[in-house]
């Protein structure tokens, strides 16, 4: 990438980075550029129906590569799979996050609500920017967000299941891309990608500009069914690389959970034909063990069970949960002893709520708790509603309805904020209450 020649035009680069699609590790100077001239379309030997990828030898005065026809180029690609990668992947260390869930569990709704909330909460509460690393990669997620939060008919009751298209197993529109290695075609999953950076108004000057590239992997639920992952279709290999696993669980799919109250039986579409949810998690766990984790050991990474549709059921765990928020203001003590005021995650709130939700699941769907806790050492159960408290049931069809203008997610950002607070990235501070109720920074 000619970093020596054009270092004044480029921000500092990592010494090595990882392609978030094929997991190839490479130095930034080996990155390929994507041609712009139309004569170079469909000439690449790995990515069909795409512009030629090339290692440049000529640059503009602004540090942009010139393609073989002399056109200035702006986009980058992995030197191995040739799939496009965003520039921040060369500048910021990556944080990989995998989302596991059964078909129909509400993964897409959760991800749309999570992204929407993080775009608002991180800048306002933590002075951290949260932006798309690549608009093209995140287009599907942006469409989800638009359907829920910028709907063209915000005041019209609409069927909830029609607002967001189901994630498919194939097609560029659903985050999958085919790459040719000679005669072998391999399909890769392309993540949603975000850039997180501490803003210039961050209360700790030493944190300003510090950040991460966030890669979120969302497979179609069918990808976790037995036999779907193979050499030509390695779409769940991200499970090995991820720092955190989210297991999206819809308790209302289970008749034992619905037996908690008659109000839980309204507006439920039978999804029993889609298979057991704990079976999907167990298949994901099996693949992780096949990739190197001993069957005698538990995974040390955090697993957060995202228990969806809590607007329908959370009162069965504890009515007070609806009034709680783990996002608080605190005085944070830095490593050098200096203090500064910042937003923070009260981990005690998350852990208390987790215990209550776990107790409820243990009574109703114990095999889910057993499946997760037999695999991982560190498990939390977080109630989430992607839509909030204003859903209703159509008296004619029995299906859930909502006015998009009334969508108000509950705790959709909490799994991600908690994961970051418990990590070592020093981006989202964590605090907890001591016995006197005083907020303190943990050591």
Image: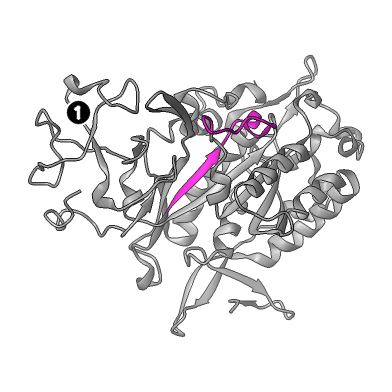
Q: Is residue 98 left or right of residue 249?
A: left
Q: Relative to the observer, which residue lies in front, 210 or 260?
A: 210
Question: Within 10 Å of the Cα at label 1, are there few (<14), some (14-19), or many (20+) other Cα atoms?
Answer: many
Q: Is residue 339 left or right of residue 81?
A: right
Residue 42 percent location from the top left of the image: 27, 20
Q: Which residues are magenta?
A: 213-233
Give the residue at x 81% y 54%: 358
Residue 2 percent location from the top left of the image: 16, 51
Q: Relative to the observer, which residue lies in front, 94 or 152?
A: 94
- Tell me if residue 223 is in the magenta stretch: yes
In this figure, which residue is indicated by the disc labeled 1? Answer: 36
Q: Is residue 35 left or right of residue 308?
A: left
Query: How is colour applied across the structure in the image?
Result: one colour
* Location of the C terminus (image quadrant): bottom right
Q: Relative to the observer, which residue lies in front, 119 or 6?
A: 6
- Tell me if residue 391 is in the magenta stretch: no
Picture layout, residue 75 above or below residue 183: below
* Quadrant housing residue 66: top left
Of all residues, the one furthest to the front in this rendering is 183
Give the residue at x 62% y 31%: 223
Label 1 sits on a secondary structure element that is loop
Give the residue at x 53% y 41%: 217
Of all residues, the one furthest to the top in this rendering is 396
Residue 193 percent location from the top left of the image: 44, 43
Picture layout, residue 204 above or below residue 92: below
Q: Relative to the observer, which residue lies in front, 274 or 140?
A: 274
* Quadrant housing residue 397: top right
Residue 412 percent location from the top left of the image: 62, 46
């Amino acid at each position: 990438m000619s970093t020596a020649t054009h270092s004044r035009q480029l921000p500092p680069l990592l010494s090595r980075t990882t392609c978030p699609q094929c997991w190839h590790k490479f130095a930034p100077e080996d990155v390929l550029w994507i041609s712009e001239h139309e004569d170079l379309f469909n000439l690449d030997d790995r990515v069909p129906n795409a512009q030629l990828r090339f290692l440049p030898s000529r640059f503009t005065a602004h540090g942009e590569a010139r393609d073989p026809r002399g056109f200035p180029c702006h986009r980058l690609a992995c030197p191995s799979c040739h799939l496009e990668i965003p520039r921040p992947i060369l500048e910021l260390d990556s944080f990989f996050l995998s989302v596991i869930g059964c078909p129909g569990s509400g993964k897409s709704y959760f991800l749309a609500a999570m992204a929407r909330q993080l775009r608002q909460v991180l800048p306002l509460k933590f002075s951290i920017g949260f932006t798309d690393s690549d608009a093209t990669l995140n287009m599907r997620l942006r469409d989800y967000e638009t359907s829920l939060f910028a709907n063209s008919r915000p005041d019209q009751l609409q069927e909830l299941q029609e607002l967001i298209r189901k994630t498919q197993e194939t097609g560029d529109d659903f985050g999958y891309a085919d790459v040719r290695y000679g005669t072998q075609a391999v399909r890769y999953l392309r993540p949603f990608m975000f850039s997180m950076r501490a803003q210039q108004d961050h209360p700790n000057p030493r944190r300003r500009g510090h950040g991460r590239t966030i890669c979120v992997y969302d497979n179609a639920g069918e990808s976790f069914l037995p036999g779907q992952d193979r050499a030509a279709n390695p779409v769940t290999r991200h499970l090995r690389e991820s720092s955190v696993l989210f297991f999206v669980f819809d308790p209302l799919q289970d008749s034992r959970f619905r037996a908690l109250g008659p109000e839980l039986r309204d507006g439920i579409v039978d999804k029993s034909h889609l298979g057991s949810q704990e079976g999907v998690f167990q298949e994901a766990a099996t693949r992780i063990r096949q990739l190197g984790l001993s069957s005698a050991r538990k995974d040390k990474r955090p697993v957060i069970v995202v228990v969806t549709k809590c607007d329908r059921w959370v009162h069965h765990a504890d009515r007070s949960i609806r009034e709680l928020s783990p996002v608080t203001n605190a005085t944070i003590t830095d490593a050098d002893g200096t203090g500064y005021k910042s937003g923070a995650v009260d981990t005690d709130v998350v852990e208390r709520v987790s215990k209550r939700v776990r107790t409820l699941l243990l009574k109703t769907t114990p095999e889910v708790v057993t499946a997760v806790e037999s695999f991982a050492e560190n498990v939390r159960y977080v109630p989430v509603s992607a839509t909030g408290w204003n859903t209703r049931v159509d008296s004619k069809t029995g299906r859930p309805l909502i006015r998009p203008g009334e969508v108000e997610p509950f705790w959709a950002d909490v799994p991600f904020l908690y994961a970051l607070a418990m990590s070592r990235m020093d981006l989202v501070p964590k605090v907890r209450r001591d016995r006197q109720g005083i907020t303190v920074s943990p050591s």
